[in-house]
Structure formats: C-alpha cells, structure tokens
Image (cartoon, grey):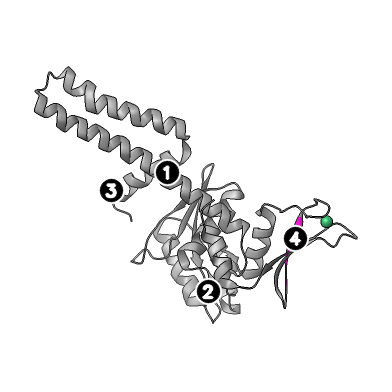
Amino acid sequence: MSKPQGRFDRAILDFLGRISGWTATVLATVSYGGIGLAVPLALGAPSYLLIAFNLAGSTVAAAMLLGWLLKRIAAGQRRNLLEWTTDLRRLNSSEFEWLVGEVFRREGWNVAETGRTSGPDGNIDLILTRGGERVIVQCKRWTAQSVSVDEIRRFLGTLMREKLDGRGGIYVTLSDFNDQARQEAHQAGLLLIDNRELFSRIEKVRKSEPCPVCNSPMVLNKSQHGWWLRCNASGCRGKRNLGKDIDRAVELLIQSA
Ligand SMILES: [Zn+2]
C-alpha cells in the first residue's frame, strides 16, 4: 500500500505526463500569477507578504515546468529503450521494468510504475489498466535458475491481497519458468511471459526500421556475430549491424531521445 503522499505525487506526475508543453506553461503562468500576485493583492497584503506569495507562486510554477520536463525525458528514454533493444539481460531492473511497461503501453494499456524499491508489497512492479480491467505485473529481470513455484505462489498471494485472482496478474521474466511453476500458474489462470514470449511481443510493437536499400521494414536477428537488423523483402540483402559491444548497446538503450 502506498502512502497518500506518494499517490498524490504520482497523480500530479501522471497528469503532467499527459498534457502538452503549452498547457504546462499556461498552468505554470496561472499558478505564478494566481498565487504570486492575484491572491495577495485581493487580500490587500502588506508588501513583505507580497514577496512571500510571489516566491511561493514562482516555486509552484517552476515545479510544474520541471515536472513536465522530467516526464518528457522519461518518455523519450522509454521509446529509445524499445527501439534499441539488444541484449536485454544487461539491463538493470528499473530499465527492464521500463521496457516491459513500454511494451504493454504499446499494446494499449495504461501503465503505472509503482516505483517501489523493496518491501512487503515487493511483488508489484507495474499496474495496468484498460477500461474497467486492472492487472498487476511482476517483472523478474534475470536469474540463472528458472522461476520456481514458490515465487508464483508468493505473487498469487500478492494478487489476493489486492483482491485479484490469478487472471489479474502477469509474471514477466527474462529467464524461464520451471514445470511446477507453469502448472501452478495455469491452474490459477496467471499469465506467464518468458524470454521468448517477451521477445516476440517486443518485435510486434517495436518501431520498424526501414531497410537502407529498399525501405521495407527490417526484423531483429541474432547470429554468432551479434545483433542485426535484416531486411525482410525477398531478394534484398539490406541489413544493419547492431554489434555486440554491450556497453555501447546499453548506452544507446538508455540515452534520451
Ligand atoms: Zn531491403
């Protein structure tokens, strides 16, 4: 359960994420003019109070513009993350959550990142909403072993506390699920997304890059030489080498647009 303060911040950030720069500027100006000038003048405030109100108005205005800017930067990073996906395992856990969130966003969901670090509700990474539907997503970036049945049960427990059954949850991992885990999830109606499923979903929503030769969309491919974008048109040999220099790839993944 999040604190009311966090929910309030998130509501403001969500709102700022949806409005245009122009609206943010108008709102900021109104806050400044309203709090900073109109209110104290209407109250007939003495001049020392005018300065205090003016300061408050400017602070609110600046905070709104800054909030809007931060949301834009985050959106740009998400886009880039998806466009430049190479070796997903090298992403850190919050980058991985971004990526998974962006995939669902492109699939038509409203996505809220819970932004938790770790705690009693550590099983909720993303909350998806669409119409009246609400789905909770847990992202498990990478583990050497398959996801076990214990982890599935723990997540089902979290869903129950959120008044959802198995169909209200999605467990995403870059690893795999062991047989027992799959069986348990199947019985509960829980959707599992493993590395292959995630990869194919990313491929479906990824912005396709045009072939440098014939302009048809290219598909992502991996060979022993690293990652490639390869032209899909018959007879065309257009391609683009994405390489396997992982530091460079991650740098590309997280850079802002
Ligand atoms: Zn081509």
Q: Amino acid at mark 4?
A: Val
Whether label 4 lies within 8 Å of ligand 1 gets the answer no
Q: Amino acid at mark 2?
A: Trp
Q: Nearer the viewer, mark 4 or mark 3?
A: 4
Marks 2 and 4, how far apart at CA: 24 Å
> In the rendered structure, which disc, 3 or 2, sits on the residue that comes first in sequence?
3
The residue singled out by tag 4 in the image is 219
Whether residue 98 is visible to the viewer of this picture, yes or no, is yes
The residue singled out by tag 1 in the image is 69
x%, y% of residue 231? Answer: 80, 59
Above or below residue 146? Residue 140 is above
Q: Which residue does the image show at 51% across and 70% down from the upper left?
A: 141
Whether label 2 lies within 8 Å of ligand 1 gets the answer no
Magenta extent? 218-222
Q: Quadrant of ligand 1?
A: bottom right
Q: Which label is found at residue 142?
A: 2
> In the rendered structure, which disc, 2 or 4, sits on the residue that comes first in sequence?
2
Q: Nearer the viewer, mark 2 or mark 1?
A: 1
Marks 3 and 2, how far apart at CA: 32 Å
The residue singled out by tag 3 in the image is 5
Marks 4 and 3, how far apart at CA: 44 Å
Q: Amino acid at mark 1?
A: Leu
In the displayed orientation, state which residue is furthest to the bottom.
Answer: 145
Give the left or right position of residue 220, taking residue 234 as reference. left
Marks 3 and 1, how far apart at CA: 21 Å
Q: Amino acid at mark 3?
A: Gln
Q: Nearer the viewer, mark 2 or mark 4?
A: 4
> In the rendered structure, which disc, 4 or 3, sits on the residue that comes first in sequence?
3
Quarter occupied by the N terminus = bottom left
